[in-house]
């Protein structure tokens, strides 16, 4: 099922306005932390202003698509400076790296999206990291607003896909 989701995201990404951008993706695999990082160096007409969630979190409520979290992930994959696949082993390093970026968003599969305040954190035993304050939504049929520490919103470490989008 995950492979199907990856393929759909890639098809969507490549089918959208391909003639307007040059894109080079660099994948770095680290076996010590089981981390996959995708760095985007691109000339693209899309910018972070094309992602209203980064400016106003509550703008997601106005999105009329069937799943605004999926729409964000598709757009953000092309716009983000880096995308990091999170797990318990790499989250501490990823959160440290996130402090160098203007906007940081984490998604969990296609049902949770949060924007982080990396300057306010609370230790989490389950994640073995200081988890930042977060604001966002969980999709339970309708979007349910959340404002808490990230570990309380994204849940316990498990097999779900957790992606961290880093924006300059």
Image: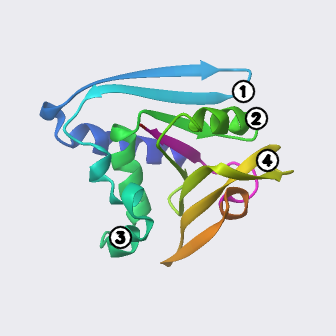
Most foreground residue, 114 or 168: 168
Separation of residues labelled 3 and 4 (CA atoms): 31 Å
Separation of residues labelled 3 and 2 (CA atoms): 33 Å
Separation of residues labelled 2 and 4 (CA atoms): 8 Å
Mark 1 and mark 2 in contact? Answer it, CB < 8 Å: yes
Separation of residues labelled 1 and 3 (CA atoms): 35 Å
Q: Which mark is residue 127?
A: 4
Tell which circle, 3 or 4, labels the residue nearer the N-terminal end: 3
Question: Where is residue 134 drawn, in percent x and y?
Answer: 61, 59
Q: Residue at x 72, y 27 (%)?
A: 33
Q: Nearer the viewer, mark 1 or mark 3?
A: 1
Q: Is residue 148 above or below residue 79?
A: below
Question: Where is residue 165 drawn, in percent x and y?
Answer: 49, 42
- Side of 46 relative to 60 (left or right): left
Question: Where is residue 133 drawn, in percent x and y?
Answer: 65, 58
Q: Residue at x 35, y 70 (%)?
A: 66
Which part of the image, by quadrant, shows the C terminus? top left
Most foreground residue, 143 or 133: 133
């Amino acid at each position: 099922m995950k492979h199907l989701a990856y393929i759909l995201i890639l098809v969507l990404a490549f089918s959208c306005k391909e003639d307007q951008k040059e894109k080079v993706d660099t994948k770095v695999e680290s076996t010590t932390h089981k981390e996959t990082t995708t760095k985007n160096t691109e000339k693209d007409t899309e910018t972070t202003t094309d992602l209203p969630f980064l400016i106003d979190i509550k703008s997601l409520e106005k999105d009329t698509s069937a799943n605004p979290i999926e729409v964000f992930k598709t757009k953000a994959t092309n716009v983000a400076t880096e995308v990091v696949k999170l797990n318990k082993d790499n989250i501490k390093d990823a959160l440290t790296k996130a402090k160098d970026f203007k906007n940081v968003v984490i998604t969990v599969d296609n049902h949770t999206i949060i924007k982080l305040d990396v300057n306010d954190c609370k230790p989490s035993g389950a994640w073995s990291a200081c988890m930042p304050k977060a604001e966002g939504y969980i999709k339970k049929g309708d979007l349910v607003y959340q404002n808490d520490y990230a570990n309380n919103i994204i849940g316990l470490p498990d097999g779900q896909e957790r992606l961290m989008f880093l924006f300059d």
